[in-house]
Image (spheres, grey):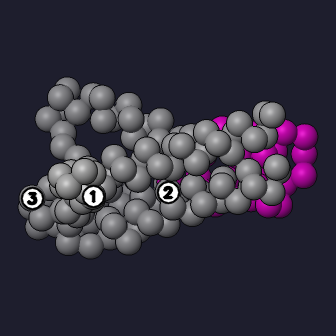
Amino acid sequence: MDLTAKILITLVALATGFAPMLADFNATHATNPLWTPHARFHVVWQVLCQTGVSLLILYLTWLASFEGHLILAAIVNFNWPVTFFITLFNMKRFAGSLKDVNGIPPFRFRIGGAEHLVDTNLLGASVLTTLNVVATGLLLA
């Protein structure tokens, strides 16, 4: 069970630590001409900060050997989704949005012949949160 939990924790850490570099270090975010320079500064800072947190999680998962290191890794791994959902539920307070006009298109899927659109960030956060909840449950079982 620990190996499965370690793999799930690792997948979440890699996704939250390195996928945003691909998604955000381009013209949709970090070099977006529609964003203010200060907003671009903050997105780069936020991505690099989460990368550092993810590297810590990977260390705790695979190299640390103290009692509770895997539980600590799983708990720290909740940093990204918890802050994502706090921000999501407070978007009206700062006129936020999950996407920009020139941003990443939504994920499309069909159910019963009807097409549905889900924001890519929301889908990713939901999947990664679920994986980390499963990993944490395995460690606590």
The kind of residue tagged 1 is Phe
The kind of residue tagged 2 is Thr
Horizontal side of residue 25 vs 36, given as left or right = right
Quadrant placement of the C terminus: top right
Residue at the image point whose x is 73% and y is 51% from the top: 5
Nearer the N terminus, badge 3 or badge 2? Answer: 2
Residue at the image point whose x is 69% and y is 39% from the top: 136
Residue at the image point whose x is 26% and y is 66% from the top: 30
Vertical order, 5 against 14 (above or below): above
Q: Please say if the residues under marks 2 and 1 sit with CB atoms less than 8 Å apart.
A: no
Q: Which residue is mark 2?
A: 16
**Residue 32 in view of the camera:** yes
Total marks placed? 3
Q: Position of residue 64 (x, y in %)?
A: 84, 54
- Of residue 95 and residue 78, the one placed in the foreground of this image is 78
Q: Position of residue 128 (x, y in %)?
A: 51, 50
Vertical order, 133 against 5 (above or below): above
Horizontal side of residue 4 vs 8, given as left or right = right
Q: Secondary structure at mark 3?
A: loop
The residues tagged by marks 3 and 2 sit, at their Cα atoms, a distance apart of: 23 Å
Q: Secondary structure at mark 1?
A: strand
Horizontal side of residue 86 vs 31, given as left or right = right
Horizontal side of residue 141 vs 76, given as left or right = right
Magenta: predominant secondary structure element?
Answer: helix
Question: Residue 109 shows which numbered tag?
Answer: 1
Q: Position of residue 3 (x, y in %)?
A: 80, 57
Q: Which residues are magenta?
A: 50-77
Q: Residues within 10 Å of mark 2 (few under 14, many from 20)?
A: many
Q: Which residue is mark 3?
A: 101
The residues tagged by marks 3 and 1 sit, at their Cα atoms, a distance apart of: 21 Å
The residues tagged by marks 2 and 1 sit, at their Cα atoms, a distance apart of: 23 Å
